[in-house]
Image (tube, rainbow, N blue to C red):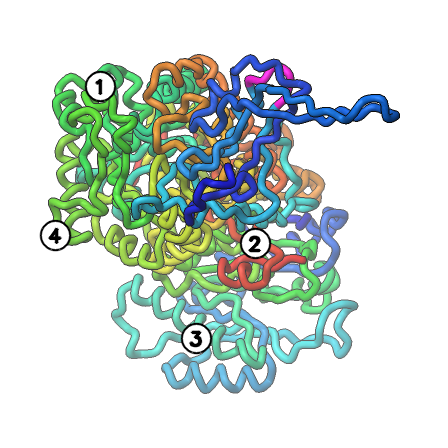
Amino acid sequence: MSSNRPIVPSTLSVKDLPWQIIWDKDKCTLCGKCTAICPVNAIELGVFRKRTIETSMGLESAPSNDFKIYYGIRQKTDPAYSCVGCAMCNLVCPNDAIIPAKSDEADKLRFHINQGGQPQRRGGRRGVPGSLLDMIKFIRISMLTDPALDAGRHEFELTTLLGRILSPEENLSFLNENGWIPPVREIYPLMIGGMSFGALSPNMWEGLQLGVSYLNEELSMPVRICTGEGGCPPRLLRSRFLKYVILQIASGYFGWDEIIHALPDMKEDPCAIEIKYGQGAKPGDGGLLMWYKVNKLIAAIRGVPRGVNLLSPPTHQTQYSIEESVAKMIQSMSMAWGFRVPIYPKISATSTALAVLNNLTRNPYAAGLAIDGEDGGTGAAYNVSMNHMGHPIASNIRDAYLNLVKIGMQNEIPLIAGGGIGKNGNLAANAAALIMLGASCVQIGKYIMQAAAGCLGSETNRCNICNIGLCPKGITSQDPRLYRRLDVDEVAQRVVDVFLSFDTELKKIVAPLGRSTSLPIGMSDAIGINDYNAANRLDIKYVV
Amino acid sequence: MCRLFAITSDKPLSPMKAIEALDVMREGHDGSGVGLFLRDMGGPFENMKDAPIMSGVFSEKGLRLLDTFMMEIGFMTKYKLSIKTPKTPPHGTPKRDIYLIRAYEYPEEWDGLSRKELHERLLIIKLQLREMGEEKKDMIVFSFWPDTIMIKEIGSPMDVANYLKFDRSELKARIIMAQGRQNTNYEINLYACHPFFIQGFSTMTNGENTAFIPIREYLTSRGFHGYMGYQSDSEVFTHILHYISAKLGLGIEAYKHIITPLQNEDLKDHPSAFFLKQLKHSCRRLIIDGPNCVIGCLPNNTIFMAQDRKKLRPGVVGGNQGVFAFSSEICGLDAALPDRDKSKDFQPMHLDTAIVSPERQEVKICRQTDQLSLPL
C-alpha cells in the first residue's frame, strides 16, 4: 500500500486474512499456473521493485544502489478476493513454490465480509471441527459366553428397512383381510443424502449415480441415493436405475414438472420420495442455488429461467400447517405412485422434532422420518445459519428413538440420521454410533464429496465456496471448464471404494459386539462415552 | 456355559432324572444354581390339573402376607407339598424359610370365567405378589399356574436336589426342564434363573442374547403387563414365545422365523416367502443375535429345542416312542435314556426346530426352509 493511499475501514493487510500465501521466489518458475487456477483470483502476477545496496570493501568506491525488478505472486487483500485456502495453487505448482498457510490468529476478514450490507454466504459446513459422535466408543465386546464373530468370514445381514412397517398384529390381520400393506424397501443403512442436480456438477452427479448403480447391480449392495431438490435428469427418470433413487420434493418444487410428466413412462418406481421440510445446515431456511450455477441445463431440468437465484421458501407454501402439509403431501405423493412408494419427510434437527414425529406416528402413510443435524452440509447458505442454527443430531435422534420406544412404534417408523457423519473421517464409527442410538439408517453428503471427488472443504474454513459455482475440483460447479476436471468413472469407482470399505468397517464394529443377524438398531448397551453429561443425556454408559 | 436338560415322558418321572443328567454335564456349569420346571404332573397333583399351583420361595413373614392376600381374593389351599429342609444348607445355598408348592381352589366368584380371563387374572396375581415381595425380598414367585411347578435355588444341582429331596414320591412329572447354571453375575437373583415362565409358556436358554436391550425395549412397549422383569437377557425368549403365540396366534413352527428369520437369499424361493418377509419386517425387533440354544414348553405340553442362526451352542434330542429328552450334551442324554435308539439322535442346526408333541410319538423336525403352515 502506498503511503498516500487512504485507509478505509475495510482495508486489510495480508496478515488480517484467514489464509496467507507463502510463495518461494527461488522455487517459482513463473509458469502462471497458480494464478490461472485460483478459483477466487486471490493471487495475481506481482511486479516487485527491489533495491540492493552495494558497498565495497575499502574506500576506493562509494556505496551504490542497484535497482531491480522481479516478478512473482502477490496476494490480494480486498475482501472480495481473499484466499479461501483451497491450495489449488499448491496442487498445480510444478515446484511446490506456493502454499496457503492458515493465519496464526483469528482473521479480521470476518468483520468485513458484509460489504454493501450483504452478510456472508458460503457453501460447505459448520465451522466447528469437533464431533460428539467421535467420542462414542463401542464398549460391549463379546468375550466368553458369546464369542466375538469373525468380521471377514461370518455371514452378516446388515440391511435396514425404509417404509412404514406395520405392527405385527396389524400386519397379520391385514394379510388375512387383504388390507393395504405399506411399501417397505430393504436398503443399505448408509445412504447418499440429498444433493441436487444443480448444487452438484453434472459429472459429480453422474459419478455418484454410476457408483450407486454399480453397487446395486454388480455387488448386490442395496445402496440408495437421494436427488436433493433439483429434479432428476429425464433419462434417469425413465430408466430401470430409478429404483435406486430417492426423489426429493422441497418447497421450491424444482424439477417436479419434469418428474410428473415422466410418470407414465417410468419403468420402475423410485425407491422412495423424500419431502424436504428442512435441512441441518440452514435449518428453517429454504434451499438456495445462486445464479452463478443456473445455466441452461440446470434451468431446463428445474423448469426455471437461466441466471437467476433460485430460492426455495423456508416452508411449503401451499399448505396451511405442518400437520396438514405432511399429511397432504404424503397422501398426494402416495396417490401419484399408486401407494407403492414409501414417502417420508426430512426435517432439520430441532428441539421440536418430537412434535413432528408424534404427528407421523398418527399418520399411517408416513414411511419414516429423516432428521438432519447441525453438522449437515449445503451448497449455499448464510454463514450465520450454518454456524449458529440447528440442533446436534445425536441427542435429537436419541430423543426421537426413545419417544418411539415409549409408544411402542420403534419398528414402525424408521429414523434416518444425517449431519456430520464422518466429518472427521470416522464414517463407520459415527454411523454405527447413530444406529445404536436408534437410527435405522444414516445419510451422508460431505463425506462422499470428500472421499469420492476430493472436495477440499473443511470445518476450519477451507474452500467452502460451493455457492458461487467456482468449485476448484468441479464438484459443485456448473462451468464445464471446471467440472471437466472430474472424471465420472473415477468418481463412481471411489463411491464403490467408500461403500466397500464402510461395509468392512461396519462389520469390524458389529462382529466384536456379537451381532450379525440384524442391524443393531438401538443397541445402546454397546456404546459409551467419556463425558458424564453426554452419557446421561443420551442414556448410555459413562466410561472413563 | 449353562447346561440344559428336558425330558417328556408318558410316565411321570422324578426330577432326579433331570438332575442326574445335569450332573454328568457338570463340567459345563459351576454349581451356582439350578432351575426346575415340572409340567403334566403325576402324583398327588394328577387329579387337580386345573388347580393353579403357586411356586416360590417365601420368608415366614412373606408367607403370612401371601395367606392374607390369597384369602382376601378367595383362594383356598387345596393341597400343599411341604419341603422340610435339613438345618444346614449345602455350600453356597442360602437358608430359606419356605419353599412353597401349593395348589389352590379358585375363588367361587371366578366360576364361569372364560379361560382367557382366568389366565389374565392368574398372571396379575403373580405380578402383584412379585411386586409386594420386591421391597423386602420376602416373596419370590416363580409361577402361579395349573399343573406347573417351578423350583429354583442357588447351589450345585445335585446338592440342592438332595437338600430339597427332589426324589420324594409326591414330586413326579411327565415334563421336566432343568437348567444347571453357569453364573455370569456376581450376585445371583433367583428371578434371573432359568427356566422363565409366563402364562403356560416356559423356556430356558444358554448363551447370551446380544440383542437383549432393543428386544427388551420392544417387549416392554407392547403394553402388556406380563412383559417385565428381565433380570436375565434370556427372559425375552419366553416372552417372545408368548407374544407370537398368545398375541399373534402363530404356532411354534414360526418361532424361529421370528427370532432368527431366514436371510433374503433363502427367502427368495421359499414357498411361504411373502408371508415370511412380512413377518421378518414387522417382527424385526424380536430378532435375537445369539448364540443361544432355547428349550421350551408350550401350554399344550409340547416341548421344543431351537438354535440361533450362528449355531454356536450344543444341543441334542433323542429318545424312544413315549419318552424323549433334549440335552445340551449327548452325555446328558446317555445318562437319562441309555436305551434309546442312538442312531435317531438329532442335533438341531441353525434352521431347525425340534418338536415333541404331547403324544410323544416322534421328534418332528421343522426346518425354516420348509413351507410354513399358516394360521390364517
Which of these two is toward me, A501 or A98? A98
User: Which numbered disc covers residue B99?
Assistant: none
Q: Which residue is mark 4?
A: A320
Q: Which residue is located at x 26 percent, y 33 percent?
A: A229
Counting other residues with Cα less than 10 Å from the Cα at mark 1, is it few (<14), some (14-19), or many (20 or more)?
some
**Prevalent SS, magenta region:** loop
Q: Is residue A448 magenta?
A: no
Q: Which residue is located at x 82 percent, y 23 percent?
A: A56
Element carrying mark 2: strand
Q: Which residue is mark 1?
A: A296
Counting other residues with Cα less than 10 Å from the Cα at mark 3, is it few (<14), some (14-19), or many (20 or more)?
some
User: Mark 3–mark 2 contact, CB under 8 Å?
Assistant: no
Position of B278 relative to B41 (above/below): above
Q: Amino acid at mark 3?
A: Gln
Distance from Cα at disc 4 to Cα at disc 2:
65 Å
Q: Amino acid at mark 2?
A: Ile
User: Mark 3–mark 4 contact, CB under 8 Å?
Assistant: no
Q: Quadrant of residue A398?
A: bottom left
Distance from Cα at disc 1 to Cα at disc 3:
74 Å
Residue B200 point in image, percent of width and height: 43, 58
Which of these two is toward me, A215 or B143? A215
Chain letter, disc 2 residue: B
Q: Which residues are magenta?
A: A92-97
Give the left or right position of residue A99, taking residue A26 as reference: left
Q: Nearer the viewer, mark 1 or mark 3?
A: 1
Marks 3 & 4 on one chain: no
Element carrying mark 4: loop
Q: Which residue is mark 2?
A: B176
Q: Nearer the viewer, mark 4 or mark 2?
A: 4
Q: Which residue is mark 3?
A: B128
Q: Is residue A96 magenta?
A: yes
Q: Quadrant of residue A54?
A: top right
